[in-house]
Every structure is written in structure tokens, then in C-alpha cells.
Image (cartoon, rainbow, N blue to C red):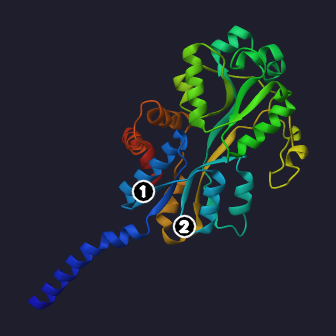
Amino acid sequence: MYSAVKTLLLTSAVLGTLWPAFAEANPITVADPGYATAQGTAYVVKVLLEGQLGKQVEAVKAASVPVIWEALNRNNGEIDVWTDVWLPNQKAFVDQYAGEGGKVKLAANYYAGTQGYCTTKTTADRYAIHSVYDLSDATKAEVFSADGKGKGKIWIGAAGWLSTNIETVRARDYGFADFFDLQTTDEAVATADLDAAVKAGTGWIGYCYGPHQNFARYQLKVLEEPAHDPTSWAFVEPSDPNWLEKSSIKSAYKDAEIHIAYTRSLAENSPEVAAILEKVTFTTDDVSKLAFAIAVEGKAPETAATEWLTANPEVVANWLGN
């Protein structure tokens, strides 16, 4: 009897020593693309799964949306969860990887996202720039140039964003592309330019989306556009060499649906995780507040997520089915 108990205790001690190594071998991986809104939702999922299910979850840096989707589709643990699936922006990837026969699942729940062009309220009021059609006025475009002369500068998004290709089409079809240099830089660079313009009282204009911390940080004005009309919205994917010529967009975005995607292998191996991911959803205001805490207040994404979860116990209870 003593020998059996001793053996059991020794075995438990050995397993206790080895178990963390086994647990760490295959953590659940959540994509972290580096921008605050997606970091907020990604780390909420990370902290939630760790705290409620005892899972080990790792946030994985990912540079672009195509890379994230390719990693998801490989189903090998590189990336298991992606919390920032914007539709229709990422529709091509959803159709390819989450459709029939695909290796990715798209959670049914979503929250709303908005997209358009923003300038500061001060600039809009000072120069009477309220509509996208105002940008095709050469004099008004000069407001956004470096020296007040010549072409203006407009940020249309970061390289690798699907919306950046869409914005290239929209700039042409709204008639202002010839009056602007279309800038594609990292979002951090664009935000730094916006911050500098606000402090200097000069003009800034660019692609904007909500939820976003900048709506809380600055007084931004969203330019008016024709309401979304699906008959005036034809976008051809850049895999077609003639995509730009074949595309035509002459109305505003439809409000986006922002979903969570996760791999089929995760659903098969950890159905309890998939069940929670199907219930997790946010509001636009939730995500803007998370992003503000990360990008403006300088909190680590995990800290911001932990504080948000602590402050929203009823939301968490609903996600967990309690």
C-alpha cells in the first residue's frame, strides 16, 4: 500500500514538473496585428480563455490581413483566432477560407464598424470641407499640402489592408485622385501626422474607421458621401491584373460587420473554446474604449483587456452562459 502511494506521489511530482512543458507546447494562438482596436479584442479573448478555461493563450504578432488568413487556413496552430474580420472588406478571404470546404469558421455574432474619410472639425469648418466632392476642388485640396501649394496629401490606409485598395478606387471615382498624393503608410505614421497637424493647426485628411481611439482623442469630422448603393459598388480583387480598371465605387461603405474567425482544428480539439468564441461580441463603444486605453493612455493590451473584463462582469457572464 505504502509503495503504491509512494509511486503515485512520485508520478504526480514528475507529471507536475513536466505538465507545464506539455501545456506550453501547443498554446492557443490569437492574432495581434499591432493596431489598438484589434489588440483590444484579441487580448480580451486571450485573458478570458486563460482566466475562465485555464487555457494557455499566446498573442502572435502578424503584419497583414492576408498573412493572418493564410496562417488560419493552414490549421496548424500558427494562428487559431482572429478577432477583427471586417465584412465586406475581408469578404474574399471569408469566401475562400471560411466557405464550404474551408478550414476556418466565422462566428455568427458581430458588431458594427464604420468607414469613410475624416478631417479635423476645425479644418472642415474653416475651409468649408464637408463632402468628398469638396476634395476635387484644387483650392481646397491645397489645404492638405505640405506648404499650402500644389497637391494635397491624403492617407488611404496601410499596405496590406484590403480597404487601401478600395480607397484607391474611391479616390479615382469620387474625382479627387488627381488633386492628391495618395499616401499608404503604417497607421502609426498616419496618426503621428494627424497629431502634428492638430497641434500645428494645419490640415490633415485620411481614411478613418470606427471603432477607433482617434474619435475620442481628436475632434474628427466624417465627410459626407452618397449613401451606400450596392449597384454602384463593384470591386474586383487585386489578384486580377486589371482590377483597378474593372472596379467602380461611387457610394459610401455599408456599415461593416466585425466578426471573430477561428480554425476548424481549434473547434475540433477545444469545442468549449469554440462555444465561447461564438458568444463573444462587443459594441463599437466597447472597442473604442479599449483602443483608447491602449493607444492613448499607454496601457499594455493585456492590462487594458483585464481591466475591461473586470469592469464588465455581466457581459462576461453572458458570454460564458452563466
- Residue placed under numbered mark 1 in the picture: 49
Q: Position of residue 290 (x, y in %)?
A: 47, 37
**Quarter of the figure with residue 223:** top right
**Which amino acid type corresponds to the residue marked 1 in the rendered image?**
Leu
Residue at the image position 84 percent from the left and 36 percent from the top: 229
Residue at the image position 46 percent from the left and 30 percent from the top: 296
Please say whether residue 1 is visible from this viewpoint.
no
Q: Position of residue 36 (x, y in %)?
A: 52, 39
Q: Position of residue 317 (x, y in %)?
A: 42, 48
Residues at circles 2 and 1 in contact by the CB criterion of under 8 Å: no
Q: Position of residue 146 (x, y in %)?
A: 68, 20
- Which one is nearer the viewer's eye here, 155 or 41? 155
The answer for how far apart the CA atoms under marks 2 and 1 are is 14 Å
**Quarter of the figure with residue 148:** top right
Left-right relation of 98 to 319: right
- Which one is nearer the viewer's eye here, 153 or 7? 153
- Residue placed under numbered mark 2 in the picture: 267
**Quarter of the figure with residue 169:** top right
**Which amino acid type corresponds to the residue marked 2 in the rendered image?**
Ala
Q: Which label number is shown at residue 311?
A: none
Left-right relation of 243 to 122: right
Please say whether residue 122 is visible from this viewpoint.
yes
Q: Secondary structure at mark 1?
A: helix
Is the N terminus in the top left, top right, bottom left or bottom right quadrant? bottom left
**Rendered position, 128 above or below 158:** above
Left-right relation of 129 to 185: right
> Which tag, 2 or 1, sits closer to the chain's start?
1
Q: Secondary structure at mark 2?
A: helix
